[in-house]
Image: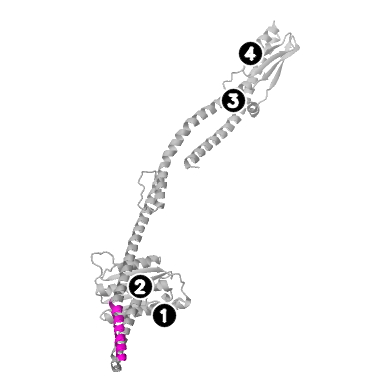
């Protein structure tokens, strides 16, 4: 059921509940009111009859006075008066009220529950009893009055409800329009349109929902844009890596394989001619080419997968990486430390840490011209994260240039791991990179420092 009809149904249910409660209270009060009215009418009738009966005993025409007494009650709405035991009977019936809304149902009379009350006033004429005056209450007129008032109230309420419900329907419709616009925006959002925003003026409650939706959409829009940008850059990096490998294969492997084939062809020709003394030269040439190809393939494998990481562990692999650059840049001081708690973190985590250190070292020695490079791999105090810090005292970044593929690649690696990467120039000069990676492996007792055991 649509929300608009649910709200109208709730309004109607509340109206009917209020009407039922009001009707119950009205009926209770009506029963009490009718009973009070009947008692008051009976009391007034008794006093009137008593006053006249006391004067009849000495009256020259008692029958005429009795007829006048009965006639005086003919306009009453609540009392039926009759005379018994006299020369002739006389009786006065209450006037019957008109019913604009029809007859009173029996169930309503039973709900009111007021029965007639009867009182008899004896008559004494000449010192001897002579019948009496019977006074009987008749609640029908009072019940009719209550029924008419209650029916009129119901008719007024019905007219009011009939004219109000369309107005409520229209007001609720206008009030729900902002929710409909939010729903439409969320549907577009679910279809991938993260640029959608809701800018309509809303009530304070809906304004909070609108602002929260806009912030969520903006963040996802930015995240989606970052993902597309990173995906494009990763594809570019992949293509560049493939291009480098293809160039190495074409420029390095191809010529040496061709040279080996040439040497083999020459050796075959020399063997056919019996010139075996010249085979040694070609054999040495093939050996040199094979060693060069081995070094080249090893270098290419090192770019594709860290050599020695799985065999010797993270600390040894980082040490070999530092030695690689130390041989080429001996004037730079290198300080590397890998905490014992950071060994055996898993191939994925180890590879990520290794690539971060590898990229940072490469950037530092090629662009920063530092005198000192420090590398630190450790766990935080609770042991939930691995913190990788690489800093140098070189030139740092100038004028905040666009991020290079190396930094973007590191950022993507860390983000995929569920970590955070920060980098920037240091206050005292140089450049620093810090990565925080989640670690799912708990600390073992043997890996804890001696003081913490």
Q: Residue 262, position in %: x, y?
A: 29, 84
Mark 1 vs mark 3, CA separation in Å: 100 Å
Mark 2, residue position: 355
On whether residue 299 falls in the magenta region, the answer is no
Mark 1 vs mark 4, CA separation in Å: 123 Å
Q: Secondary structure at mark 2?
A: helix
Q: Answer with left or right where residue 148 lies relative to residue 417.
A: right
Give the foreground label among 1 and 3: 1
Q: Which mark is residue 147?
A: 3
Q: Quadrant of residue 19?
A: top right
Q: Residue 338, position in %: x, y?
A: 38, 77
Q: Quadrant of residue 426?
A: bottom left
Mark 4, residue position: 74
Label pair 2/1, CB-CB below 8 angstroms = no
Q: Answer with left or right where residue 250 lies relative to residue 60.
A: left
Q: Secondary structure at mark 4?
A: loop
Q: Secondary structure at mark 3?
A: helix
Q: Residue 199, position in %: x, y?
A: 35, 46
**Disc 4 crowd, CA 10 A, few/some/many (<14, 14-19, 20+):** some
Task: Please identify the residue farthest to the front as the structure is shown.
Answer: 273
Q: Earlier in the sequence, mark 2 or mark 1?
A: 1
Q: Earlier in the sequence, mark 3 or mark 4?
A: 4
Q: Which residues make up the magenta segment?
A: 251-272
């Amino acid at each position: 059921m649509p929300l608009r009809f649910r709200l109208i149904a709730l309004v109607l249910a509340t109206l009917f509940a209020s009407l039922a409660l009001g009707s119950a209270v009205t009926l209770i009060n009506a029963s009490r009111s009718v009973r009070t009215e009947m008692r008051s009418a009976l009391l007034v009738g008794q006093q009137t009859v008593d006053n006249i009966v006391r004067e009849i005993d000495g009256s020259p025409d008692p029958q005429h006075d009795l007829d006048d007494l009965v006639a005086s009650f003919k306009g009453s709405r609540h009392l039926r008066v009759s005379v018994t035991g006299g020369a002739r009977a006389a009786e006065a019936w209450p006037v019957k009220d008109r019913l604009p809304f029809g007859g009173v149902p029996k169930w309503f009379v039973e709900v009111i529950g007021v029965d007639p009350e009867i009182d008899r006033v004896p008559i004494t004429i000449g010192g001897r009893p002579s019948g009496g005056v019977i006074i009987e209450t008749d609640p029908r007129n009072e019940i009719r009055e209550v029924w008419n008032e209650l029916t009129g109230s119901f008719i007024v309420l019905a007219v009011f409800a009939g004219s109000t419900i369309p107005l409520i329907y229209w007001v609720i419709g206008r009030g729900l329009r902002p929710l409909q616009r939010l729903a439409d925006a969320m549907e577009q959002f679910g279809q991938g349109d993260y640029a959608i925003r809701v800018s309509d003026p809303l009530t304070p409650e809906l304004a909070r929902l609108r602002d929260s939706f806009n912030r969520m959409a903006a963040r996802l829009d930015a995240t989606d844009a970052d993902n597309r940008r990173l995906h494009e850059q990763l594809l570019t990096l992949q293509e560049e890596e493939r291009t480098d490998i293809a160039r190495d294969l074409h420029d390095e492997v191809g010529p040496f394989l061709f040279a080996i084939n040439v040497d083999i062809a020459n050796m075959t020709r020399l063997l056919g001619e019996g010139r075996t003394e010249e085979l040694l030269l070609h054999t040495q040439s093939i050996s040199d080419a094979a060693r060069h190809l081995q070094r080249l393939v090893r270098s290419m494998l090192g770019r594709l997968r860290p050599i020695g990481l799985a065999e010797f562990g993270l600390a040894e692999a980082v040490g070999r990486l530092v030695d690689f650059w130390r041989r080429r840049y001996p004037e730079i001081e290198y300080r590397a430390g890998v905490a014992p708690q950071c060994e055996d973190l898993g191939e994925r985590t180890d590879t990520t840490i290794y690539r971060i250190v590898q990229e940072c070292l490469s950037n530092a020695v090629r662009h920063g011209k530092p005198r000192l490079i420090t590398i630190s791999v450790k766990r935080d105090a609770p042991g939930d994260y691995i913190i990788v810090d690489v800093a140098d005292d070189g030139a740092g970044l100038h004028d905040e240039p666009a991020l290079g593929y190396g930094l973007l690649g590191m950022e993507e690696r860390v983000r995929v791991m569920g970590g955070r990467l920060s980098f920037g120039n240091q206050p005292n000069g140089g450049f620093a990179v810090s990565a925080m990676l989640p670690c799912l492996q708990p600390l073992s007792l043997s890996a804890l420092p001696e003081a913490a055991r």
